[in-house]
Image (cartoon, coloured by chain):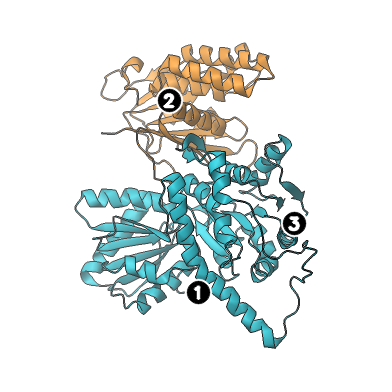
Chain colours: A orange, B cyan
Amino acid sequence: MKHLTEIRWHGRGGQGAKTAALLLADIAFGIGKYVQGFPEYGPERMGAPVTAYDRISDSAIRVHSNIYEPDFVVVVDDTLLHSVDVTAGLSPNGALLINTEKGKDEILPLLKGYKGAVYTINARKVCMETLGKYFPNMPMLSALVRISGILEKDVFFREMEASLKHKFEKKPEVFAGNKKALEAAFDAVEQISFAADGKRVEIADRRVA
Amino acid sequence: MGIKQRMSGNEAVAYAMKQINPDVMPAFPITPSTELPQFVSSYIANGEMDTEFIPVESEHSAMSAAIGAEAAGARTMTATSSAGLALMWEMLYVAASNRLPIALALVNRALSGPLNINCEHSDSMGARDSGWIQIYAEDNQEAYDNFIQAYRIAEHKDVMLPIMICQDGFIISHGVSNIELLEDEAVKAFVGEYNPKHFLLNENEPMAVGPYAVSCYGMESKRAHAQAMINAGRVILDVAAEFEKISGKKYGFFEAYRLEDAEIAIVAIGSACGTTKDAVDLLRAEGKKAGLLKVRVFRPFPGKELAGALRNCRAVAILDRCESFSANGGPLAAELSAALYQAKGQAEVLKIVYGLNGRDYTVEDARQVFADLEEIAANGNRDGQEYRYIGLRE
């Protein structure tokens, strides 16, 4: 009877974690969902750890607290793995997505024995190849949609295209780069750990919320 | 009839401001209300509003300019938070006592110290005796709906008082969620034109605003001000009834959520009420008779009505997102306890302080409060401690 999906974003000030969270809420709203997208503000400065949240539901959302037992966690900056307990409360039936250039052997020991699925993506590579600049939030959003199944792929791309076109109306080249980044990111996700019960949770099998 | 949208609380209130299009907005930016003058400035720059925006050098000046504009006969609004409201303090009393129906969008934030930008009600609660009407919102929808109703209440001939429309800083102001907006025409028709009876720019009626009052007159002035606040209660309900006709949304002094047969209840203000509703539903599913009383109107204080809504409860927790440093609980707890005493209420009362400096208030916190209430309803308040904290780190 669970129709609520909860997502927690960990990033650093300036990386766009909040923007990505709000964009996801925007897109889920566009397909008729009830949504919440909100940041948790600490000291506002570039580089400080930032947390942002999404709730996506089929019914009205009344709760106004932060999210302590998320279904999915997105880590936009892997240096946070040393300082922030990113897997705190994360559902073992959910998944963790990390932006990193590092391999499984370096990442897994930092996850405090998290028992669910873990995915990585090298968003820097995706960004440099498509945008020529490092803005990891759009690739991370695309990768999250891939691993979570919270939106159908074509719905996500259709809605993102509309949203980006509107946002970068006067800068068509920025729109084109972002679109490429989203597409490349969708295919650049790697699964480095599977749920503890040994069952591989196929991305395609995840119920669309 | 509503337009389905998703917006943050600040976007929603700015949208209401655009639809109402008042004459003047003097404002000075402060987190988390900065977006309000920012959005309004954009609307003006885009030609979507023709409000006269006055950038001022401080909040004291913002309220002073609002007083001048409103006294001149212009429908006026401003926005602020925390220390901004504190800097307006002197002028808040001047606005209210001169009976100037200014609308102030307040985005609630803690006062220093420690220096903190997050939600607390200490700013507006500190101004509770300044003679302003105060209405609070649970979410972005209510913040929007309350702002649409603001001028109808404030400018009513039996009221003529300034009004604060409050929403929880960051939690509501910066959280994006679903909302239903009204059509521009519906808002304009509902709010109507402002035609003040007396105003400074009326050349046919020279008048003074804010002169010295000698002792033979000053007290009568205050009594008239107090009467206006008493009258505001009826007007708030009348305006809510008319608002329901255009929006389908029901408002009053408070919302009673599953309270009719409740034995234990939480009383709260603002976004904590949504979170508490989820806790109430969980307890109800376990067969426990829990309820919520959400206070929407704090000034005027509907003490009799609130006490009446709690008459069947055996134990009640009154939550304040504000520390009064009275050593006896927060302002809502103090005033509601007094009202319960006057109403000869029999309920055990807990006065609980929560959520200071943006401390999160969770469904689990609400459940803890209800667990304490259950214990007290069954066995009485055995340790005698009525004044407590929830969510405090050990």
Element on which disc 2 rests: loop
Relative to B165, A28 lies left or right: left
Q: Which residue in the structure is indicated by mark 2?
A: A31
Residue B57 quadrant:
bottom right
Between B163 and B285, the one nearer to me in the picture: B163
Residue on which disc 1 sits? B326
Tell me the distance, in whole angstroms, between the alpha carbons under discs 3 and 2: 43 Å
Looking at the image, do the residues carrying marks 1 and 2 touch, with CB atoms under 8 Å apart? no
| Residue pointed to by mark 3 | B58
Is disc 3 surrounded by few (<14), some (14 to 19) or many (20+) residues within 10 Å? some
Q: Position of residue B2 (x, y in %)?
A: 46, 38
Which one is closest to the eye, mark 1 or mark 2?
2
Looking at the image, the residue that sits furthest to the front is: B204
Q: Which sits earlier in the primary sequence, circle 1 or circle 3?
A: 3
The N terminus of chain B lies in quadrant: top left
Q: Nearer the viewer, mark 1 or mark 3?
A: 3
Q: Which mark is residue A61?
A: none
Q: Position of residue A101 (x, y in %)?
A: 53, 19
Q: Report which quarter residue B59 is drawn in.
A: bottom right
Q: Nearer the viewer, residue B69 or B340?
A: B69
Amino acid on which disc 2 is placed = Ile
Q: Is residue A84 visible?
A: no
Q: Position of residue A81 (x, y in %)?
A: 49, 32
Farthest-out residue, bottom: B216
Q: Quadrant of the C terminus of chain B?
A: bottom left
For mark 3, name the chain: B
Tell me if residue A117 comes above or below residue B282 in the rendering. above
Q: Residues within 10 Å of mark 1 (few under 14, many from 20)?
A: few
Q: Please state which amino acid type lies under the numbered disc 3.
A: Ser
- Please check whether the numbered discs 1 and 2 fall on a single chain: no
Chain ID of residue with mark 1? B
